[in-house]
Image (spheres, helix red, strand yellow):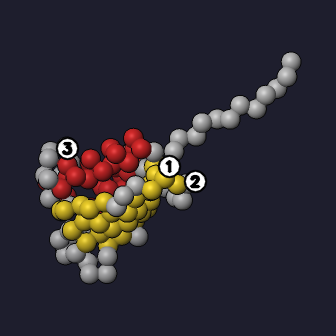
Amino acid sequence: MSLELVPRSEPQIYLLAYEMSVPEDSDEALLSVVAHKAAELKVCGYIAHTHCGRKVGGELEGTETGLQMMVEWMRARSHGNDLGDGEKIKSQMKEPRFSKWKLQSGAKYDVFFCC
């Protein structure tokens, strides 16, 4: 009996950058809602307030399916679609913009985090 090494097909990992407007007085609850959804979809990366305080941005990394679901969720939240979340938080995300997806040679992040 011979043992052959069969290459395992690893899922392709993609990376994209994003940015969206938020009210100047938005709190950490918004960041934690996004982080929770990312963890639920197994999407890694980060979210942070920009220096002006009226935008948040970061990077998302994951499989094509996970990223597509995360992008759709963020767009739906920005349009005020009811997703079962709080009304106040739902209205904070506005005008999300996403970069082109980049195929990664390997994962850059292990988790999704707020900073």
Identity of the amino acid at label 1?
A: Ile
Dot 3 corresponds to which residue? 83
Position of 3 relative to 99 (above/below): above
Residue 21, quarter of the rendered image:
bottom left
* Residue 21 visible from this viewpoint: yes
Comes first in the chain, label 3 or label 2: 3
Identity of the amino acid at label 2?
A: Gly
Residue at image location 64% in from the left, 35% down from the top? 8
Identity of the amino acid at label 3?
A: Leu
Give the image location of residue 40, x and y in percent. 39, 45
Residue at image location 14% in from the left, 53% down from the top? 79
Comes first in the chain, label 2 or label 1: 1
Comes first in the chain, label 3 or label 1: 1
Residue at image location 19% in from the left, 43% down from the top? 84
Q: Dot 3: within a 10 Å radius of its alpha carbon, few (fewer than 14), some, or many (20 or more) residues?
A: few
Q: Dot 2: within a 10 Å radius of its alpha carbon, few (fewer than 14), some, or many (20 or more) residues?
A: few
Q: Looking at the rendered structure, which numbered label has been put on residue 13? A: 1
